[in-house]
Image: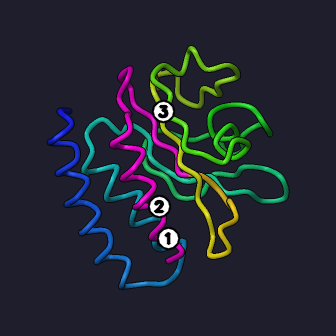
Amino acid sequence: MEPEKKHARYQRLYEQISALMEKSEDPDARMATITAVLHHKMEYFSWTGFYFLHSGKLTVKTYQGPLACQELQPHAGVCWACIDQEKTMVVADVHQFPGHIACDSRSLSEIVVPVRNRKHEIVGVFDVDSTSLNSFDATDAGWLEKIVNLIYH
């Protein structure tokens, strides 16, 4: 998708999701809404969902797309890299990422955004996969960070 078109779409989606967030303060309801809207409005999102830290493990929460890994091996893969490095990870080719965890063999690129609670602690990640290489860029990262921040604010 062209950068200008992508930016404009994210702007519209952010406004739509912001309005929907006013309907509930429950973080699970907000995550489900974010997942559904983005998964169905961004054609290159093949798997869209959240993993949350629970007892030292990353466990899947709400998602849309093919069957997910229920738990992710600690400190391996893109999701754990996001937590360990405390930053959004944009991976152009998952096969080039050391320790990539392949829950769906069709996934070729990925973006993972940290989810922070009201205390600014990382409590989980928002994970998006694509079946195309190089699907994600700084535009996705910036807008997805902004959207994910709506969960607890």
Q: From mark 1 to mark 3, how far is it between C-alphas? A: 21 Å
Give percent across and percent down for residue 55: 84, 58
User: Magenta includes 145?
Assistant: yes
Which residue is located at x 69 percent, y 52 percent? 59
Which residue corresponds to the image point at 37% horizontal and 34% vertical from the top-left? 137
Q: Amino acid at mark 2?
A: Val
Q: Position of residue 22 (x, y in %)?
A: 36, 84
Find residue 15 and report its horizontal and vertical position in percent: 24, 68
Say what amino acid the circle numbered 1 marks: Ile
Q: Is residue 35 magenta?
A: no
> Residue tagged by mark 1?
151
Which residue occupies the foreground of this view, 132 or 141?
A: 141
Mark toward the start of the polypeptide (3 vs 2) = 3
Question: Which of disc 3 and disc 1 is earlier in sequence?
Answer: 3
Determine the residue positioned at 68% across, 61% down.
123
Residue at numbered disc 2: 148
- Residue kind at label 3, given as amino acid type: Glu
Residue 110's disc number: 3
Total numbered labels: 3
Q: Residues within 10 Å of mark 1 (few under 14, many from 20)?
A: many
Residue drawn 45% across and 65% down? Answer: 32
Quarter occupied by residue 135 = top left
Please determine whether, in this image, residue 56 is positioned above or below residue 153. Answer: above
Q: Which mark is residue 18?
A: none
Q: Quadrant of the N terminus?
A: top left
